[in-house]
Amino acid sequence: MSLASHFNGLYYAGRDKISVRFSLSSHGLIQFEAGERGRLEIALHSTALELIGDPATTLQIGWHDHNGRHALLCGEPELFDKLLSLNLPSPAREHITALQTRQRRQLKGEKHRVPVYLGLIAAFFIGGYFTLHYSAPLIADMIPYEWEQKIGAFAFENYQVGKKTVTDQTVTDAVDAIVKRIDRFDGAEIEYQVAVVDADMINAFAFPGGYVVVTTGLIENADNPEQVAGVLAHELTHVLQRHSMRKLVRQAGMGVLIGIVFGDVSALSQLIELSSQLDSLSFDRGQERSADDGAIEIMTAAGLSPQHLAAFFEKIQKADALTGNIPELFQTHPLTDERIKRVSAAAEPAQPFNFDLDWDKIKQRATRDEAIRLPANSGPATPGAEL
Amino acid sequence: MKFDITNPGAFSTLLVHLEPGEAIKAESGAMITMSETLDVDSKMERGLLGGLSRKLLTGESLFFQTVTAARGPGEVLMASAYPGEIAILELDGSEEYILQKDGFLAAEQSVQVSTKAQNLTKGLFSGEGFFVMRISGRGKLAISTYGGIQKLSLAPGETRIIDNSHMVAWSANANYKIEKASKGWISSFTSGEGLVCRFKGPGDVYIQTRNSPGFGSWVRQFIPTR
């Protein structure tokens, strides 16, 4: 095998450097032209070999003389083969072999480091996502109730901006009566605030802290107040079980989570900023199921038959099949046959209760134009306060 | 091809004269003005993966600008986004350089730029981040700094202590270690230096005379709080 005997290197004499082409003879003599310094010859045995650099892959051949320190640097791996082909004493050979192994390992490690880091970054984000996914419920539960109320109040007010609110007392009193009935039996001490918003979409939602929105579309499409009560019981369960807070926390990201754990108030303002998304967050199947269960429980306790909720679900599902339009309420709460079956199978309440309301009249008034006024900012500061 | 520094000082600019057919690559957005004989184009250096890793890891742009003298000789004037000096390095292929992530301004096409991952300690404490640029090949390279630029040449075995976040470019041969500024941890931090980098020669280290995080925290005290 013929080995190269000339290599490219960088020669340092103190702080001066020159790039050189040097040769290594079979007797271990390094020779090169060093510009103004003329031809230099150094015996290998009078030098010290060391790997330097980042990564440590450059071989430094260093020596001293009366002028100070000198070094010849070379990064060519072939130089090691040439060095090992020389007739050197065994300690020197061992040292060179060790350096060669280290150089190879470094070169390999360097090649892999960028992909490894990229992998670690990806793993960090994936890990972070799952941590967030599973720790969100725990962290949402750490949010103090006052925060929840502030977030809800903001989202509630924000939702009503640019929307028309129904002020007709017949309508608001009716919705109030429905909410009050649920309030008595929901097993929680939350004071609800309600707004009826004029919108054709069939929708209702409850923001954290007990802020409830009902659309005129829902009132219009419900056959009786018990159906509205069923939908609201479902929505309120999402709030009571903190589903919406969990969703929000999941949207918020790591920084806010840490803020919540340490009670940092700036996390609150970030959650408030995110709260405008609350009405469009969708829940997962497990959360829908538990909200249905909660609705059944509240309805039964309040003397309302869960069949009303099931009937409303069925009505909507049939309408979907005809028009192909899924009402907003069920875009964020996907309606499945399984859900309808579960609700229909629920037991009837022991002491039935029916609202004493003229529902047809309420429906009529909810959709009348004069029942509606322009939104929030022209009225009282808290939009729900008049109810 | 000729690289010249014009407007030397805090707001220095780089003037490059190109002969027909010559081209340079530059930091995206660096061009200020150029002759009408030149074409500016964008190119992902080292392909999509190389571009992406540079974008994601070093925070540099996904694309480099390529300025080509397509229709005759011409000149292009360039500068980086922040105030500071520019230095021109002549690479002869015998030495590679490591460049901090904002340091690249422009280079000849024969100069290669790739992403290099620093090890954990350096990534966390050097002030340069986990990813830096590795410059190899031959040709002219223009680097930009925040503040003035100073070259320190180290002899073999010579060591030099440099405050972290003041390094701009250094020979790949000159390795450094992170260490505390004083003997004790407390005095390291109360001295205001915290961690420093100990470079070992041989090699050249280009340092900047100001550092942007330091400037940031100095200026922050004058910003009125809401």
Image (cartoon, helix red, strand yellow):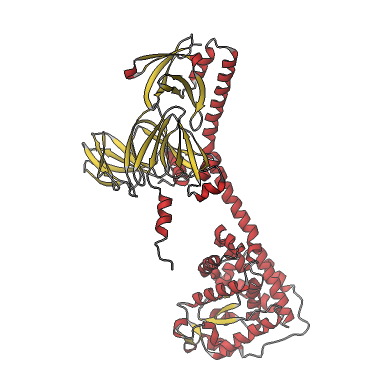
- Residue A327 seen in the current view: no
- The residue shown at (55%, 76%) is A153
Quadrant containing the C terminus of chain A is: bottom right
Q: Where in the figure is residue B46, as x and y percent of width and height?
A: 42, 37
In-image side of A363 versus B10 (left or right): right
Up the image or down, A66 lies above or below B136; here it is above
Location of residue B114 by image quarter: top left
User: Which of the two residues, B183 or A135, is positioned nearer the viewer here?
Assistant: B183
Report the number of discs: 0
Percent across and percent down for residue A99 are 55, 23
Percent x, y for residue A113?
53, 37
- Above or below B175: residue A171: below
In the picture, measured across the screen, residue A49 lies left or right of residue A246, that is: left
Image coords of residue A76 (percent x, y): 46, 22
Image height of A346 relative to B6, above or below: below
Q: Is A333 or A41 nearer to us in this picture?
A: A41
Residue at position x 40%, y 66% in the image:
B224
Q: Quadrant of residue B109?
A: top left
Q: Residue furthest right?
A: A350
A22 displayed left or right of A364: left
Q: Is residue B52 visible?
A: yes
Using the image as rendered, state which of residue B20 and residue B60 is in the foreground.
B60
Most foreground residue, A297 or A246: A246
